[in-house]
Image: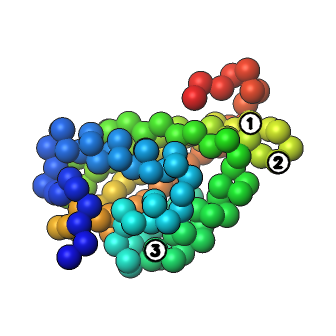
Amino acid sequence: MEQKLPLPPFNFETATQKVQLAEDAWNSQDPVRVSLAYTVDSEWRNRSQFINGREEIVNFLSGKWQKELDYKLKKELWAFTDNRIAVRFEYEYHDASGQWYRAYGNENWEFDENGLMQRRFASINDLAINEADRRL
């Protein structure tokens, strides 16, 4: 059986560890690596887009990182209970024209008993920034 440690139920230490592992994976910009943290039938809402399953996750992330250049993400544990974690995040990137952006948001995560994320709901806002205003 496929597992992704740490497993629920979460405590502060394991929830913090899960958040850091997610941040590290996303910052790798490797869509396949990221997808392996999710169930094969994982459900996402990312902004107004609905994504289902690892194959769609890989396709979505591949397109994302072709457009969001020099991507850098920071996640922060907000809350946790049993098999759920909520995070706040921000990330920065620039587009092909060189315009930089900072994106802010919240994610709600739900995990199965094997530590794989089965649901991810993300609310995200973008802000155009000057390169000199970057924080990450």
- Please tell me how many numbered marks the rendered image carries: 3
In the rendered image, residue 117, in percent from the top left (x then y), is placed at 32, 64
In the rendered image, residue 115, in percent from the top left (x then y), is placed at 23, 62
Amino acid under disc 3 = Arg
Which image quarter holds the N terminus?
A: bottom left
Residue occupied by mark 1: 100
What residue is rendered at 38% in x and 79% in y? 41
- Under circle 3, the secondary element is helix
Residue occupied by mark 2: 96
Distance between the Cα atoms at labels 3 and 2?
27 Å
Question: Can you tell which of label 1 and label 3 is closer to the viewer?
Answer: 3
What residue is rendered at 35% in x and 41% in y? 20
Sequence-first tag of 3 and 2: 3
Residue 48 in view (yes/no): no
Instruction: Tell me whether circle 2 and circle 1 mark residues in contact (CB < 8 Å).
Output: no
Amino acid under disc 1 = Trp
Q: Which mark is residue 54?
A: 3
Q: Name the side, left or right, on which 24 lies relative to 99.
A: left
Residue most extreme to the right: 97
Q: Name the side, left or right, on which 65 lies relative to 52.
A: right
Q: Which mark is residue 111?
A: none
Residue 74 in view (yes/no): yes
In the rendered image, residue 8, in percent from the top left (x then y), is placed at 16, 57
Asked whether 50 or 20 is in front, the reply is 20
